[in-house]
Image (spheres, rainbow, N blue to C red):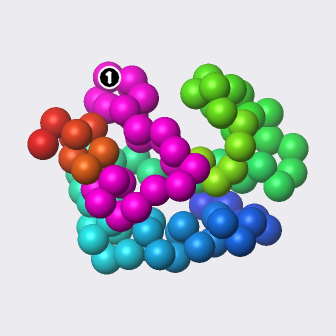
Amino acid sequence: QRRSTAILSVNCKTLEATVLYSDRVAQQINTEGVVPMKIDLTGSNPEGRKMLEEVQRLTIPLLVIFDREGQVIFKSDAYTKQQVIDALQLGLGE
């Protein structure tokens, strides 16, 4: 799992703190079968930009959740804890 350091926008930091790092969402993200990935676009990152182009969205913040077959089942730049939990469970086939 790659970790990156980045100067994130206020929106990115807010969504991370209030949604992605909340206990309920973090528990789902740490479930077997979930592979979290963070793309840092503060510098040159052709691989990260390519991934964003593949989901047809170059804006940040952006959360994309794929199912086990690699199909996009959730894509949003503003989301709630429950939306993320529901999408993760759907992606895991729960």
In percent of width and height, residue 4 lies at 67, 61
Q: Residue 36, position in %: x, y?
A: 45, 51
Q: Report the number of discs.
A: 1
Which span of residues is magenta-colored?
63-85
Residue that sits furthest to the left in the current view? 94
| Residue 8 visible in the picture | yes
> Eyeballing the image, is 21 above or below 56?
below
Q: Tell me: 26 left or right of 3.
A: left
Query: Where does residue 27 sit, x and y in percent of width and height?
Result: 27, 67
Tell me residue 78's x, y (percent): 53, 55
Give the quarter of the figure containing the C terminus: top left
Q: Is residue 43 left or right of residue 57?
A: right
Based on the displayed image, in which of its 4 quarters is residue 56 positioned? top right
Q: Residue at x 27, y 71 (%)?
A: 24
Residue at 64% across / 54% down in the picture?
A: 61
Q: Which residue is mark 1?
A: 69
Residue at 54% x, 67% y: name it: 15
Name the residue type under label 1.
Glu
